[in-house]
Image (cartoon, rainbow, N blue to C red):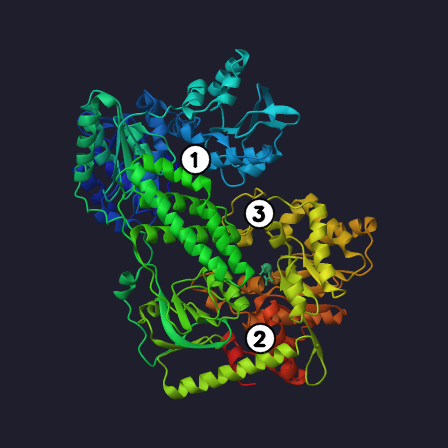
Amino acid sequence: MLELTVEQISMGQSAVDKPAALQLLANHLVADGLVADGYLAGLQAREAQGSTFLGQGIAIPHGTPETRDQVFATGVRLMQFPDGVDWGDGQIVYLAIGIAAKSDEHLRLLQLLTRALGETDLGQALRRASSPEALLKLLQGAPQELALDAQMIGLGVSADDFEELVWRGARLLRQADCVSNGFAGVLQQVEALPLGDGLWWLHSEQTVKRPGLAFVTPDKPMRYLGQPLSGLFCLASLGEAHQALLERLCALLIEGRGHELGRATSSRKVLEVLGGELPADWPSARIALANAHGLHARPAKILAQLAKSFDGEIRVRIVDGQDSAVSVKSLSKLLSLGARRGQVLEIIAEPSIAADALPALLAAIEEGLGEEVEPLPAVSQQREVIADIAEVLSAPASGSLLQAIPAAPGIAIGPAHIQVQQTIDYPLRGESAAIERERLKNALADVRQDIQGLIERSKAKAIREIFITHQEMLDDPELTDEVDTRLKQGESAEAAWMAVIEAAAKQQESLQDALLAERAADLRDIGRRVLAQLCGVQTPAEPEQPYILVMDEVGPSDVARLDPARVAGILTARGGATAHSAIVARALGIPALVGAGAAVLLLNPGTPLLLDGQRGRLHVDADAATLQRASEERDTREQRLKAAAEQRHQPAHTTDGHAVEVFANIGESAGVISAVEQGAEGIGLLRTELIFMAHPQAPDEATQEAEYRRVLDGLAGRPLVVRTLDVGGDKPLPYWPIAKEENPFLGVRGIRLTLQRPQIMEAQLRALLRSADNRPLRIMFPMVGSVDEWRQARDMTERLRLEIPVADLQLGIMIEVPSAALLAPVLAKEVDFFSVGTNDLTQYTLAIDRGHPTLSAQADGLHPAVLQLIDITVRAAHAHGKWVGVCGELAADPLAVPVLVGLGVDELSVSGRSIAEVKARIRELSLTQTQTLAQQALAVGSANEVRALVEAL
Ligand code: PEP
Ligand code: MG
């Protein structure tokens, strides 16, 4: 990333001419290890193609694409030449910025410089600058302008209360990239200022990226704090950018004209009153930029020169970009766009010159603005497609055996049904807004009807809910409004629809929350359905008999949509075992293998497959004997599961009489009913963050108490192990602003976060204690890594317990961080229990992201290093008479159960569906046999060796 810092600046340099200056710069870049010696030739060659003089006394020498391989690291070095260097054509350079970049990163630098380039006399100021700091300040230029244009105005938005209106305003700011996620949460904490005439004002500097003002009015009369509310300003404040606007607004209010804003029916009116940027109602045309290196200095110069030959204003903006249109005649403004290949430019021209200027500019851009350009590929929904991989891979041969990641146990036999997304080409421009609107309306109606059919056919509530959400998305007025705006600008129904869907999906993803990211997958899912409908693309018909679904990667909603009666098994090219899709597949009881590699996508449809979801094996077109063995094994397994299900309510004892408790993991209070029905002896992990996520705002104490009571009621005296909120890092709550982190898994999450927000933690603890009513309640804290964290959490709970006494309460911690396991001998003296979260413990011990698309296969909780940590934990706990549970996914792995029992784990907490099987597995084992096994497992060097030991048991 190119940024400007004082360390990069060399003041007071001198060079007799341009070659000497280039030599100096190249020496500097070489000496600092950014480039190889040969880069000088690149700088010279680039100048020979065209001067890198930018204007205002600045030049930006950089290498040619041919010399990019001479770049070791991206960076810049700045040299001040107070005496000036003639850069050709009498252009004098006082500051040369030498760029070492492997790609088009200099465009970013140009963007950084543009604010300065607009200044008059910058060249002389650069020449006179006496320190690197002063020079840098000059380069940073004038303060940023306040963003205020039609996109920032929302009139008559649907909102039921003040909070919703705030949310709408914050959303406009976020869409304009003025603020980061969580700004709505920030504004909710700020005290609103009544301005009179029904207008209210809110502002904050927190999480602001660039200054901007949004104005929203509600669709119905509203009151707030006893006063009318007809319009709300939300300011993302940065520096003084809003000063002029504020002065205009005050003048307006003093003149008694405030009501004009609250009653405004067009954003133009609001902008006129506030002095914001008025949308030009001028003819426009769009074109995709094909230049390989984007709109860099040379093509931009040609474009600006051409624009200058017309006597009138011409502006350009990037379609889908955040910035407003800039003058095409200004080179610096053009560069500030940072337009890249493939981005669509919209050229807007004053009516008097539009008829001549627009075609001329479009033709020049199409011809490459002085550069040879490769035409852009036809617009298509791009995803990895078969054609790409077919070049380097071939389908697994008949009779071959592949190893993949076991994701859900069971044996599945059936023909391959390959579902790879097809590339769908579509036109960018439509016939007319009316025709395109009608086409889209019909496509939406068809898709809605399809989904209705799916809802009616789905037996599982969770699956029905996914489809109901899809229908709601189709009907979302915000989506359709935005699409309509694009249709009016001449886009085709396909282009408008896909652009809006993609923007909404990106927005969801940017929230960095696993659940919300899944909504992004849902959005793209319905986006594609509608696109396919518009383009008349048929999806391949499903085979009649139960099949093995082969996909690149399955999203949870894909899995949830599957009908287990038709889909015998799932095979994916990518993905990991603790990915959500794998967890959902297990919950549905569909055998699954993930991460099998891209070659499986090349299998011929209908190829007979045999998939072993426990051993992680895939047989392609297996011979009759193998099939026979597998189907016998499958039948035996089914019988075993049936027998296990009959025994699900019985406790699990080993053959030598050692009891292991089997509990359930749940994430919603309603889940307790089926968990008990499936044989749970208690709840071993209530993931309370999922309860929080199910609420649009933080549930208050009473709401939480009701949720926890529901679980305890459902348990009818069985113990409940609750985990306090485990959010932050990769799974923030939408209503809690949390600073973005480079490494969220190593950041402020779990107990670290809640200890920083004691009110939230106390409210949760109070709700828990109140709900107990003397029933067995165990509270544990997630992600504890130090004794001090545990003590703080314990002390807080003990203090509240004085207020709200609970008879049967135990306090413990999750063992998910290696430091906690290693400190178990110290912690065991103080806690009542430990619960090992193997998902995180494995990720932190092996330094492998648990959701990593290619590495997570190696994040196997049976790795001896992880087992060592569990062993330390159990020994320490038992030495002090405390119990240990395991609540990570490992607890349900049939190969892991004997090892965990042998290590002395007292309780296994698994998903409801696995309870009967885990109990049955325990009943087959003797404690002494598992103890020997565990000792052997601790002594080997890899998870595979451990698995082999268990297989041989
Ligand atoms: C774990 O880390 O193993 C665990 C149970 O917690 P979660 O999967 O919710 O992070
Ligand atoms: Mg965890």
Q: Position of residue 558 (x, y in %)?
A: 45, 60
Q: Quadrant of ligand 1?
A: bottom right
Element on which disc 3 rests: loop
Pointer 1 residue: 176
Does label 2 or label 3 sit earlier along the sequence? 3
Q: Residues within 10 Å of mark 1 (few under 14, many from 20)?
A: many
Which of these two is toward me, 240 or 895? 895
Pointer 2 residue: 896
Q: Is residue 294 above or below residue 892?
A: above
Q: Position of residue 3 (x, y in %)?
A: 39, 39
Q: Is mark 2 within 8 Å of ligand 1?
A: no
At label 1, the amino acid type is Ala
Q: Is residue 883 above or below residue 8?
A: below
Kindly indicate whether the residue at mark 2 contacts the one at mark 1 (C-beta within 8 angstroms): no
Q: Is residue 126 above or below residue 343?
A: above
Q: Position of residue 820 (x, y in %)?
A: 64, 61
Task: From the viewer's perspective, tell me whether residue 526 is left or right of residue 432.
Answer: right
Task: From the viewer's perspective, tell me whether residue 256 is left or right of residue 479.
Answer: right
Which of these two is toward me, 708 or 910? 708
Which of these two is toward me, 576 or 643? 643
Single out the mark in the foreground, 1 or 2: 1
Pointer 3 residue: 733
The total of numbered circles placed on residues is 3
Kindly indicate whether the residue at mark 3 contacts the one at mark 2 (C-beta within 8 angstroms): no
**Marks 2 and 3, how far apart in space?**
33 Å
Q: Is residue 861 above or below residue 456?
A: below
